């Protein structure tokens, strides 16, 4: 179960920016407005985009599948959003939005052979994503596959993202964390941006009250997870590290089926597209939260969770609000660093689609026969290897830290609570 942990985490870092374009790009905002959603608030379109594969789901089902959102917040928008546009219309609109976004980013490179190769590899991984007890992954996998390579690639990324997210919720349940406790634990264990997004103010963006946050804090303190100053105890850090390791284990199946060489090839094919997403500034906050609301990131899944779109801080700038809803938390600079490290560490492997392709799509992707300096993906620990633990150290173990004996897949970044 452990042989593909690092591959799973690295591919998540690589595919997340592609998936996130739906929640943050201006084209998606315009399409949402075009079918009648109020775009002054991030929640209507966010809940619509992400929930539509489930059909006209009610608030109970959505709260169960989203987990860390307050049921009260969800009930404010669901099922009301379905009176604006039904699931079928939303699904058509979201593909239209993604088509417009990626068409702008790729231009005349949409027909390049390397894009088709990337789409084929990603689809193969997605079709091998086990969906037992993974409702959001299963719902997205049930959708018809788009024929256009760029849309097939995006849908594959979405299946894989929800597959990982569903598994992460199983890990949270296994560790005995209720929805609000998951956020408190994430905030206490993280540092920098990882801690900031899940602070009480940002958690309010998911609908939790200050009292609920405080009560969850007290419950975790009673379990020995949190110190009086709000930081994680050694036990809390170890438990969170074990939770992240379990998340990676549960996400490894599609990549084990694809194989290490093909996963490495896909990582190389994806890098220029990820570069284009970051260069376009798509993952930056798009607006300040409406008056009267608690600060929260105005980006895609507010972790993002919430609405506008997960983003990083522009150079010299300060992000407005907290974290987007729905995506996996972590600041964009960290994601960028992870992307760069992934590209450096993963040489291309041969696939049946390999072959020299004119530099029409991914000029930085070496052809299969070109020598490429590389560091192989690290060996993984045994399944029962202990979580990182150094009693003599006062340094916190970052959320999402690699298990003992592995090389980190880029800066530590925790999964969405």
Image: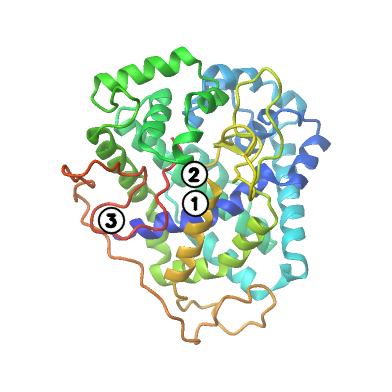
Asked whether the viewer can see residue 91, the reply is: yes
At numbered mark 1, what does the secondary structure look like: helix, strand or loop?
Answer: helix
- Binning the other alpha carbons within 10 Å of mark 3 as few (below 14), some (14 to 19) or many (20 upward) gives many
Horizontally, residue 354 falls left or right of residue 225, namely right
Cα gap from disc 1 to disc 3, whole angstroms: 24 Å
Tell me if I can see residue 127 in this picture.
no
Name the residue at 43% across, 29% down.
Answer: 183
Question: Mark 1 or mark 3: which comes first in sequence?
Answer: 3
Query: Which label is found at residue 62?
Result: none
Classify mark 2: residues with Cα within 10 Å, few (<14), some (14-19) or many (20+).
many
Residue drawn at point x = 38 percent, y = 14 percent? 215
Which residue lies under the disc numbered 1? 334
Please tell me which residue lies in front, 284 or 9: 284
Residue 157 in the image, given as x and y percentages of width and height: 56, 53
- Front position among marks 3 and 2: 2
- The coloring applied to the image is rainbow
Residue position for label 2: 330
For residue 242, side relative to residue 15 (left or right) = left
- Tell me, yes or no, whether the two marked residues, 1 and 3, touch with CB atoms within 8 Å: no
Q: Please, what secondary structure does the residue beneath circle 3 have?
A: loop
Residue at 33% in and 49% down = 401
- Quadrant where the N terminus is found in the figure: bottom left
The CA span between labels 2 and 1 is 7 Å
Q: Secondary structure at mark 2?
A: loop
The disc label shown at residue 2, or none: 3
* Nearest to the observer: residue 178 or residue 314: 314
Query: Going by the image, does 257 lie left or right of 95?
Result: left
Q: Is 216 drawn above or below residue 348 in the view shown?
A: above
Residue 366 at x, y percent in the picture: 54, 80
């Amino acid at each position: 179960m452990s042989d593909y942990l690092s591959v799973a985490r690295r591919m998540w870092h690589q595919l997340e920016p592609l998936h996130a374009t739906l929640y943050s790009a201006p084209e998606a905002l315009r399409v949402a407005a075009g079918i009648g959603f109020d775009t002054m608030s991030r929640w209507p379109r966010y809940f619509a985009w992400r929930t539509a594969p489930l059909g006209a789901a009610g608030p109970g089902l959505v709260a169960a599948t989203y987990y860390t959102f307050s049921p009260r917040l969800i009930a404010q928008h669901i099922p009301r959003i379905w009176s604006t546009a039904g699931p079928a219309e939303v699904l058509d609109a979201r593909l239209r939005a993604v088509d417009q976004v990626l068409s702008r980013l790729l231009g005349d490179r949409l027909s390049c052979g390397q894009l088709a190769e990337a789409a084929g590899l990603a689809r193969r991984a997605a079709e091998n994503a086990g969906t037992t007890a993974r409702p959001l992954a299963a719902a997205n996998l049930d959708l018809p596959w788009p024929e256009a390579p760029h849309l097939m690639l995006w849908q594959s990324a979405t299946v894989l993202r929800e597959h990982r997210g569903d598994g992460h919720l199983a890990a949270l349940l296994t560790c005995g964390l209720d929805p609000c406790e998951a956020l408190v634990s994430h905030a206490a264990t993280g540092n920098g941006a990882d801690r900031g997004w899940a602070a009480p103010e940002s958690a309010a963006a998911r609908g939790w009250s200050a009292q609920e946050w405080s009560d969850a804090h007290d419950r975790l303190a009673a379990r020995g997870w949190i110190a009086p100053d709000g930081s994680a105890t050694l036990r809390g850090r170890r438990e969170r590290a074990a939770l992240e390791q379990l998340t990676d284990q549960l996400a490894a199946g599609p990549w084990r089926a694809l194989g290490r060489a093909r996963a490495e090839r896909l990582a190389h094919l994806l890098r220029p597209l990820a570069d284009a997403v970051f260069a376009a500034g798509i993952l930056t906050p798009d607006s300040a939260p409406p008056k009267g609301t608690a600060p929260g990131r105005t980006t895609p899944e507010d972790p993002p969770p919430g609405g506008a779109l997960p983003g990083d801080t522009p150079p010299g700038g300060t992000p407005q609000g907290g974290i987007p809803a729905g995506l996996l938390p972590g600041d964009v600079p960290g994601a960028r660093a992870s992307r760069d490290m992934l590209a450096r560490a993963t040489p291309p492997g041969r696939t049946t689609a390999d072959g020299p392709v004119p530099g029409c799509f991914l000029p930085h992707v070496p052809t299969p026969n070109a020598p490429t300096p590389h560091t192989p993906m690290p060996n993984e620990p045994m399944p029962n290897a202990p979580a990182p633990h150094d009693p003599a150290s006062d340094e916190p173990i970052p959320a999402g830290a690699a298990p003992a004996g592995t090389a980190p897949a880029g800066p530590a970044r925790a999964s969405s609570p």
